[in-house]
Image (cartoon, grey):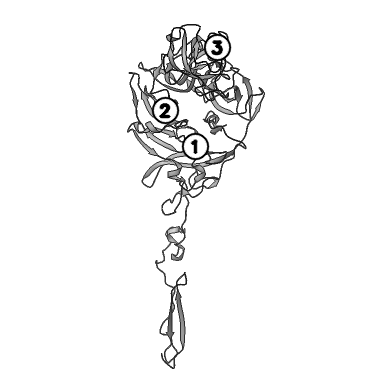
Amino acid sequence: MPTAGVTHDITLEESDSRNKRGYMLVRNRRGQRSWEIRDGQTIAPRQLTMGELSQAEFPAELELIWYQDNWQGGIGGVNHKLHPTKLASGLKVDATDYGVLRLGREVRATTVSGGNPDAYNPSGFALTQGVSNNNMLLWAFIGKDVYSGGDDNWTHSSEPQGITCFYKNAIQYGTDNIAAGWASSTDLVNAPVQYIFKQPGSATWTASDLTTGAYKYFAKARNSSGNEVIWGGHSISDTAINVNGTHNASVTTLACVSDPTSAIAVNDMIAVGEPGSRELMLVTATSSSNLTVVRGYGADAQSYSGTSTNIYLYQPHVIRSSTDFDNSGSWSGSVTIGQDDQPITGLVVDGDTDTLLILKTDGLYSYTTDGQVRNLTPLFRQFGHAGNFEGVYAWNNHIYLPLGYGGLLDFNFETATIKDISFKVTAPEETDLHGVVLAMHGDPQNLFMALKHASAQTIYILRGQEMLIGEETALRWQNIASLGAGAALTDQRTALMVDTSLSDHRRVWTG
């Protein structure tokens, strides 16, 4: 330590204050410092090339700031280095347009006038050909009533049938449309009821009166001749056999007006009575005059008297086809897909082919016009959730399979491979989005999804686009709207349809 020098102290201390290091800096006998202070620059300054300052030309001290100007990676960002184009939170942010970040889209409500529907549940939509011109007509199915309109309000058209039910999105077949009917009564809730159809020459919709006119799901495919057909799955059909006499709620032998063995076999399920007072039974034995059954097989037992109570065959594992489904047409014989205790939950066709894909609670099956039935997902045999694959949708060579407990699978039919694209995987920290996919619909560029909040009565409307970011091509999701029901949601009555009938913009309808 020089005696004539002047000292300066510097202390270096760690951020947790655990370790400190002290340094004593000394001037020489002339009072001059042997050290000097300079502002170092780790990166050499860059020269502006085009007269504009870009991020690459910022000074070194600003290089520590990370900039993001593209959010097309969508929902699911966790770390900016790993997810440079994603959003950390996407519940109220829409970034579907490149380089633009904005609040979620405005949701416009339309009014319903007339008809006094039994329930204000818009459960389905349809676009049909006009009666007197080629202009498309927009329809909404609200409870058991149908409404036309869609610009600012919906106007009551008719009530095709007087039972407590609702209808799903219609399918176009030629110039006709067909919509599946579901029961909303408390006896066999969501069981199939008679479908409705719309023809160009009719002002409104007509209910089917065919004995095989009740299906939960429809899909359009080709037959062996290359012609278009409509397939219906998960059916209830009239056996033309009635219960004979008085039966209380505990009698296990049902007397029949005519021989039941012509239409009913052991292990069949039968629905006795009409929607609203139906009972499901399991047949354990048959004879020429009666049926031995298990009562209350999924619904409360009923009492019967007289000879007017109808017996229906309940076949949740059966499909049929038709080229003419109006009330002068008919349906083919039944095709059995797997077992009846794993019901069909959806039908879909991947492209314009004759291969029908049938979703059941235990997996995905295929049926071709040569009569072959194959289980494409044998590993799902123990899956079994009652809501598996409801809302299945085919889009751009992908088949999207919603899971009953929440989540989404991407099935590639050509390679028979499955990829989990659930938000639990792609957006692990966005727990609100880990709920059930209720409905999907799309156009060639965009896929839309109605997703239920994981624990609340809220629906998120998401827009998905398949794009290449870096070296990965994947479906990127943006949340464009949030809807609160204000009450408990009925999952099966949530509807979603993309409407591109207008020339200047696209509309996404949900109910």
Viewer can see residue 322? no
Depth check, front residue: 114 or 16: 16
Tag on residue 359?
A: 2
Which image quadrant for residue 444?
top left
Is 99 drawn above or below residue 271 in the view shown? Answer: below
Question: How crowded is the residue under tag 2: few (<14 C-alpha within 10 Å), some, or many (20+)?
Answer: many
Residue linked to disc 1:
436
In the visual, does 488 lie left or right of 23?
Answer: right
Viewer can see residue 265? yes
Cα gap from disc 2 to disc 1, whole angstroms? 17 Å
2 and 3 marks in contact (CB < 8 Å):
no
Residue at image coords 40%, 84%: 34
Q: Position of residue 353 (x, y in %)?
A: 37, 23
Question: How crowded is the residue under tag 3: few (<14 C-alpha within 10 Å), some, or many (20+)?
Answer: some
Residue linked to disc 3:
309
Please state which amino acid type lies under the numbered disc 1: Val
Q: Quadrant of the C terminus?
A: top right
Question: How crowded is the residue under tag 1: few (<14 C-alpha within 10 Å), some, or many (20+)?
Answer: many
Residue at image coords 43%, 61%: 57
Element on which disc 3 rests: loop
Depth check, front residue: 111 or 102: 111
Please state which amino acid type lies under the numbered disc 3: Thr
- Depth-wise, is mark 2 or mark 3 nearer the camera? 3
Cα gap from disc 2 to disc 3, whole angstroms? 32 Å
Q: Position of residue 25 (x, y in %)?
A: 43, 84
In the visual, does 267 lie left or right of 435?
Answer: left
